[in-house]
Amino acid sequence: EIYTLSLHDALPILRHADLVPAIVYGAGKEAVSVTLDHKKLILAQEKPEFYSSELTLVINGEEVKVNVKAIQRHPVRYKLVHLDFVRV
């Protein structure tokens, strides 16, 4: 899901809804801010191929091929805070 609020305003709303903000950029296209389900991400990132394989995100009905570029985690809790994806 794409969000348009500033990250500062959106973070409490996203965390309460158990969503993780992410950005998709690269391939000469404009960067897009999206949200992803935290529980699904936790399950997906437990597999090694999450970090090394091409992933498919569906953004507004369009399939986008991406690779994980960066992941930010909470320093104490087992929570994902933010992800960066680069288009391939």
Image: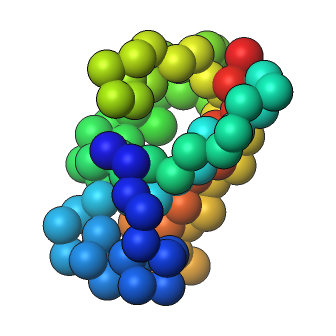
Residue in front for this viewpoint, 67 or 64: 64
Q: Is residue 88 visible?
A: yes
Q: Nearer the viewer, residue 2 or 41?
A: 2
Q: How is the image coloured?
A: rainbow
Residue situated in front as seen by the camera: 74 or 23: 23
Q: Residue at x 40, y 29 (%)?
A: 59
All told, the count of numbered labels is 0
Judged left or right of residue 54, residue 44 is left
Residue shown at 44% from the left, 14% from the top: 63
Q: Quadrant of the C terminus?
A: top right
Give residue 1's quadrant in the image: top left
Q: Looking at the image, which is closer to me, 6 or 73? A: 6
Q: Is residue 79 left or right of residue 32?
A: left
Q: Residue at x 78, y 23 (%)?
A: 27
Establish if 28 lies above or below 73. Answer: above
Taking the view exactly as shown, the residue that stands out farthest to the right is 28
Q: Position of residue 66 (x, y in %)?
A: 62, 23
Q: Position of residue 52 (x, y in %)?
A: 68, 21
Above or below, 8 against 54 in this view is below
- Residue 48 in view (yes/no): no
Q: Is residue 70 left or right of residue 79?
A: right
In the image, taking residue 19 as reference, residue 35 lies left or right, namely right
